[in-house]
Image: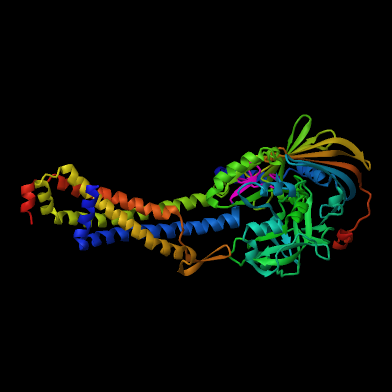
Amino acid sequence: MKRFLSQILLALMAFWLTSAAAESDPKAVELLERMDQLYQQDASHATMTMHIKTPDYERTMKMESWSLGLDYALVRVLEPVRDRGVSTLKRENDMWNYLPRVNRVVKVPPSMMMGSWMGSDFTNDDLMRDASWVEEYTVTLVEEEARYLLRLVPREQTVTVWGGMEIDIDRSTLLPLEQRYYNEAGTLMRVMAFAEVREFDGIALPARMVLTPLNKEGHQTTVEYNDLTFDVNLSENWFTLQNLRR
Amino acid sequence: MLMLKLAFRNLLRNRRRTTLTLLSMLGGYLLVALLNSVEEGSYDQVLNFYTRDVTGHVQITAPGFIERPNLHRTVPADESLLNQLSDQNGVEAVTARLESSALAYGEDKSFPVAVTGIHPEREAQLSLLVDKLTAGNYLTSDLDESGFYSAMIGHAVARQLSLGVGDELVLISQGADGSLANDLYRVVGIVGDADSMEARQVFLPLTAAQELFVLPEQAHRVLILGTDYRRATALSNQLALWAEDTPFAEAEAEVDPWQVVAKDFYDTMEADKEGSVFASYVLIFLVCVGVLNTVLMSVMERTREFGVLKAIGTSPSRLFMLILLETQMLALIACALGFLIALPANYWLTHVGFEMGEAIEVSGILFSHYRGQMSVAVFAFPAVVIFVAAFIVALLPGLRAARLTPIDAMRAH
């Protein structure tokens, strides 16, 4: 009888252990969700400057963006003049580019998702991200003295773009410091650093993000928010192909 | 002189034997000459075509472009520089190409394509692109009435995007400055068929491609056609020297003959050629055996005669020389006759050629005939073969005759 009990106990323990490995830590989930929503809140309207540096060229773009949650977004290029009006619309799982020069709306095919967005180091997929990372990754929290470290591992049987991620979060401000992307082999592929915390519409946020891909020497993309407001009144119906063309 | 006379008389004495030996040498000469001619002629045809169609004889490119093409590896290609290049000695035609890739859109579908910016007039002088048009017209540099540049598309592009002549084509790519390259073009022509090298190509006027990819007055390859692809290396060296005082030097441009530009093709070609060289050695060997046979027979037949010659005081070395001289004279006559027959035959081969069972198509151009080649080598090489073969072959019977004991020789039947 005693032996039987201990067996049950062992089985229970094993079950508890495995389920713990698959389930995310609630506090970690909360932090990750905060990261997800950081720049969007419910809805946002922003103007930003993107600076792209490669060994062959450097360029600066100015753009305006609107977003509603993670599902809807519209980005429009303001400068340089050559690309003025080029816009990208995201609705749930679909993405289109509008090219005013040829007056055409072009759907971004799935094969182009890992392609560069507007020549930057951001991929189309970076813009496409609609599911929260919470759904695709199991997240664990490591608490350190000055920061939290979130470790993201893809859930089993989930197709993810990255083989893993790490996010450093400042313990006092709860703002991200650095995000690291790994491939399936566990090699560090790119690093996004957050800096220059400023107050936008009453919310303190890092105004500058520097994305450095480690597999492409000399490449770097910096995004700086010039303006960011959250009290915009947008509905899903606003994110249409008609508005994309405007 | 006496020796020559003697040798000549000997040859005339037994006409049948002489004719037989002569025929075997003549046959050998013709066989080697014509085979060589067709072989060289075929390579010639292919190389001439290939260098014209694909690479030009000499190319000027940015360092590393040949191994790893990259949008940013460009060389200057403004009109005045190209004109200067055309004025160089031995340069027949010059053109510039800009190469990249793009996503092409028709009405709604998309298709990845290779984009080549070409200089319409210059390209027509150099390559065979004009001849590959299967529908519509050739490119022009001008904008049409609606302000579109013209474009020629490959067969696969036309089919995938359901585009025909007169339709609009959208190209989307990335410019050299990182901008989103996108523009509308008017399809004016369709190039090649489903199997041709150009099937996935879009050809734009160079200026249009330079605008699209934001590479003003730049190109990826400057192609030079000289007088002869065989002179490519010399021309390349000459142009490399010239380029040192031009804007090409600032771009650290490389000047290479087609053997470097199309290294893989050249290597395959060389390997193939080596294979056929072996085949022609086998043939030469067979010809030698044929000559040996007749020469040996003719000497054996004359054993008694040599015995008499020795008996009346001919020295062994003289006898040896006599036999060598006879065969060399025969070889000379055979080669002269062979040349007289091979000349018109080769002329016909070169200019008419004989038809292949089935024509081979190489990138839109039909090869329907085996062609010969008119060159000194084609006639000289088999002559050398015959002379050397006759010499080697005569050594053995010559030595045999020189060593004869008169009494034994005269007793022989």
Q: Percent position (x, y) of residue B169? A: 75, 64
What residue do we see at 62% from left, 61% from top? B128
Q: Classify the position of the C terminus of chain A by image quarter.
A: bottom right
Depth check, front residue: B210 or B389: B389
Residue A222 x, y percent position in the rendering: 80, 40
Q: What range is drawn magenta here? A: B57-74
State the residue lying farthest toward the top. A145
| Callout count | 0
Kindly identify the residue that appears in the image at 86 percent across and 43 percent down: A49
Instruction: Choose top left, top right, bottom left or bottom right for residue A216.
Output: top right
Quadrant location, the N terminus of chain A: top right
Q: Position of residue B269 (x, y in %)?
A: 48, 53
Q: Is residue B58 magenta?
A: yes
Which residue is rendered at x = 70% and y = 46% of the image?
A: B84
Q: Quadrant of residue B24?
A: bottom left
Q: Is residue B357 left or right of residue B384?
A: right
Q: Position of residue A224 (x, y in %)?
A: 85, 41
Q: Is residue B59 visible?
A: yes
